[in-house]
């Protein structure tokens, strides 16, 4: 009997100590732990950001499942006022030709997010304007809208590029960083590659450090100076246009970008996209696009747009996968962008090229069942100091 009272005493003492010194339920909740209340409640992981910092991006997924129609659409939203945010287009290689998997591009740039870019020619040369950090890589075609970034804002304009050479003489009306597939006057910078890829007799003017070093006739590909540019003339009539250029002259490449509203200058980068989807909130999708053909069939789509509040959005819609996602026509994509308060939007490449990577993982479902090699992409990452 005595032993029973001793055991009971220690039980009461233990409970009292736990009650007095044990952890408080409210403190547990404040630390991120919820006591069981009979409901299976999902709790988001606590943010590692300081209260004053903004997330680098916002991602969400849109799903629609109706009779005979399925859609999965991935959306990346960016607040361009975020001082930590870097968003920019990149080519697959340091030079303009060629392709690479988006996963490799993402890894190379140490990106948080990567999205497939726009259109390209069969050799991988970008299909339109690409300029960054005051250097022109590819001029605008004048056929499609161009996406511009200037400081903490992005805008889309129909634009054209004028390129010329000035200095001791002035030279205009030439192809710039374009594959030499016919007679003409061409100008090549190191961004084009190490050689001009001309496989027939042609005249070259070599400009290094801003000075003409001399001229030479070449019967095969000619080297492009790393600190200058090369002027190449294919055909007798075009060789005559270079007759006044002599060694020792000073020459430089100049370009300007124009739109209906005037000259566009001071931008951080420019990238030519596909056809307009929305302009000032109105649907302006054409029935046909030179790059992709008809826009009246459902297929995977990638688009970039600007919202009324100035935020930038990328949309990747999966398609060609029955039971998962059918894709969208151009007008169907426009309707969904309008619902997200997007006012201006344009196409990027679609089909098997539509791809989104977040933190090294392919988030969408590429229609080919695997990655497709791309000529360019958009990358999102934290700015380096």
Image: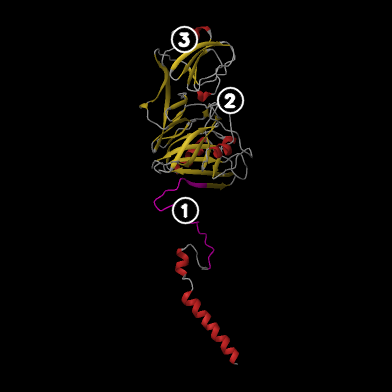
Residue drawn 54% across the image and 45% down it: 359
Mark 1 vs mark 2: which is more N-terminal? 1
Give how far apart the Cα atoms at labels 2 and 3 are. 29 Å
Q: Residue furthest bottom?
A: 1
Q: Is the magenta region chiefly helix, strand or loop? A: loop
Q: Residue furthest left?
A: 262
In the rendered view, tell whether residue 341 sits above or below residue 192. below
Is 354 displayed left or right of 173 in the figure? right
Give how far apart the Cα atoms at labels 3 and 1 are. 61 Å
Residue 324 x %, y %: 60, 45
Q: Which sits in the foreground, 143 or 255?
A: 255
Q: Which sits in the foreground, 80 or 324?
A: 80
- Quarter residue 211 falls in: top left
Is 68 displayed left or right of 227 in the figure? right
Residue 48: assigned label: 1
- In reply to whether residue 41 is colored magenta, the answer given is yes
Mark 2 vs mark 3: which is more N-terminal? 2
Residue 40 x %, y %: 54, 63
Q: Badge 2, how many Cα within 10 Å: few under 14, some, many 20+?
A: few
The reply to whether residue 9 is visible in this rendering is: yes
Q: Which residue is mark 2?
A: 123
Quarter the C terminus occupies: top left
Residue 242: assigned label: 3
In the rendered view, tell whether residue 229 sits above or below residue 43. above
Is 284 displayed left or right of 358 in the figure? left
Magenta stretch in the rendered image: 38-61
- Quarter residue 368 falls in: top right
Q: Badge 1, how many Cα within 10 Å: few under 14, some, many 20+?
A: few
Residue drawn 50% across the image and 43% down it: 75
Residue drawn 49% across the image and 26% down it: 128
Mark 3 vs mark 1: which is more N-terminal? 1
The reply to whether residue 298 is visible in this rendering is: no
């Amino acid at each position: 009997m005595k032993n029973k009272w001793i055991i009971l005493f220690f039980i009461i003492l233990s409970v009292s100590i736990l009650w007095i010194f044990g952890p408080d339920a409210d403190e547990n909740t404040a630390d991120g732990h919820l006591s069981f209340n009979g409901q299976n409640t999902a709790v988001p992981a606590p943010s590692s950001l300081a209260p004053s910092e903004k997330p680098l991006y916002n991602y969400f997924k849109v799903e629609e499942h109706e009779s005979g129609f399925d859609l999965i659409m991935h959306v990346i939203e960016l607040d361009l006022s975020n001082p930590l945010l870097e968003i920019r287009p990149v080519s697959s290689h340091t030079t303009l030709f060629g392709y690479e998997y988006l996963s490799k591009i993402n890894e190379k740039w140490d990106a948080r997010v990567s999205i497939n870019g726009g259109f390209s020619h069969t050799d991988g040369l970008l299909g339109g304007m690409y300029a960054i950090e005051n250097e022109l890589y590819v001029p605008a075609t004048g056929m499609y809208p161009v996406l511009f970034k200037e400081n903490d804002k992005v805008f889309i304009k129909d634009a054209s590029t004028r390129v010329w050479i000035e200095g001791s003489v002035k030279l205009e009306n030439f192809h710039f960083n374009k594959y030499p597939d016919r007679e003409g006057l061409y100008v090549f910078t190191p961004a084009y590659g190490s050689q001009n890829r001309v496989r027939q007799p042609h005249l070259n003017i070599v400009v290094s450090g801003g000075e003409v070093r001399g001229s030479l006739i070449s019967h095969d590909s000619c080297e492009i100076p790393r600190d200058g540019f090369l002027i190449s003339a294919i055909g007798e009539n075009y060789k005559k246009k270079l007759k006044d250029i002599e060694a020792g002259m000073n020459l430089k490449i100049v370009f300007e970008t124009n739109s209906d509203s005037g000259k566009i200058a001071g931008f951080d980068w420019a990238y030519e996209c596909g056809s307009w989807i929305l302009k000032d909130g109105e649907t302006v999708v054409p029935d046909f696009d030179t790059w992709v053909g008809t826009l009246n069939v459902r297929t995977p789509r990638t688009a970039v747009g600007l919202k009324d509040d100035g935020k930038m959005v990328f949309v990747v819609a999966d398609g060609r996968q029955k039971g998962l996602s059918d894709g969208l026509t151009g007008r169907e994509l426009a309707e969904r962008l309008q619902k997200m308060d997007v006012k201006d939007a344009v196409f990027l490449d679609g089909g098997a090229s539509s791809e989104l990577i977040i933190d090294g993982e392919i988030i969408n479902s590429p229609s080919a069942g695997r990655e497709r090699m791309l000529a360019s992409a958009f990358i999102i990452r934290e700015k380096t100091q």
